[in-house]
């Protein structure tokens, strides 16, 4: 997990194969950050076949408890597990909690909308359900609402 975090930052880690004599086999040594020295670990597990994991991308998710949007720092299976700062979805398509309809927000302020426009739907059709408080793929969108929810999706 550390290598993923280092790989997604501004600088890339220096990864080397290291085989200490007499003990274990392949280990990974990451390039040290300023003011630290690299540790030497010995292990038998090989990371040469590690899967390619992309950098995680934060999304802007609806928080039902506050009726506002926040950056979702960790989520999946239809729910955001960890919220960050207030945000506005990139397409400004937000939920109007008063009538539970997705609408374009003409005037977003701190994750909330002060002036609503026409109905809309998120481009990926991943919509919040007030019935269970989870995000689902909407299989049938009608007038800014979901008429038929499908599988769970990541907020």
Image (tube, rainbow, N blue to C red):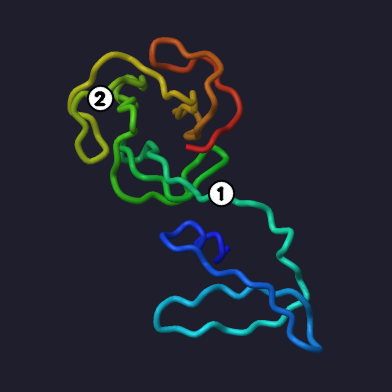
Mark 1 → mark 2, Cα distance in angstroms = 31 Å
Residue that badge 2 annotates: 105
Residue that badge 1 annotates: 54
Q: Residues within 10 Å of mark 1 (few under 14, many from 20)?
A: few
Please give left or right for residue 144 compared with residue 46 in the image: left
Please tell me whether residue 23 is drawn above or below residue 69 in the rendered image.
Answer: below
State yes or no: discs 1 and 2 in contact (Cβ < 8 Å).
no
Location of residue 101 by image quarter: top left
Label 1 element class: loop
Label 2 element class: strand
Task: Tell us which disc is closer to us: 1 or 2.
Answer: 1
Expressed as whole percent of the image width and height from the top left, the position of residue 11 reads 44, 63
Name the N-terminal-most of marks 1 and 2.
1
- What residue is at 48 percent from the left and 26 percent from the top? 124
Q: Residues within 10 Å of mark 2 (few under 14, many from 20)?
A: many
Which of these two is toward me, 41 or 11?
Answer: 11
Please give left or right for residue 20 compared with residue 135 in the image: right
Please give left or right for residue 97 compared with residue 78 in the image: left
Which of these two is toward me, 62 or 50?
Answer: 50
Please give left or right for residue 59 compared with residue 24 in the image: left
- What residue is at 50 percent from the left and 61 percent from the top? 5
Please tell me whether residue 77 is drawn above or below residue 142 in the rendered image.
Answer: below
Mark sitting on residue 135: none
Expressed as whole percent of the image width and height from the top left, the position of residue 72 reads 41, 45
């Amino acid at each position: 997990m550390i290598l993923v975090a280092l790989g997604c930052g501004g600088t890339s880690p220096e990864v080397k194969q290291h085989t200490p004599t007499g003990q274990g086999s392949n280990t990974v040594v990451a390039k040290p950050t300023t003011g630290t020295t690299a540790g030497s670990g010995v292990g038998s597990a090989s990371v040469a076949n590690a899967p390619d994991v992309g950098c995680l991308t934060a999304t802007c998710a609806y928080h039902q408890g506050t009726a506002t949007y926040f950056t979702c720092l960790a989520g999946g299976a239809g729910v955001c597990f960890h919220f960050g700062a207030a945000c506005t979805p990139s397409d400004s398509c937000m939920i109007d909690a008063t009538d539970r309809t997705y609408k374009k927000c003409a005037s977003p302020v701190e994750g909330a909308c002060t002036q609503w426009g026409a109905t809309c739907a998120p481009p990926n059709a991943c919509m919040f359900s007030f019935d269970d408080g989870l995000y689902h793929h909407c299989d049938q969108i009608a007038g800014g609402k979901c008429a038929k929810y499908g599988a769970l999706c990541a907020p």
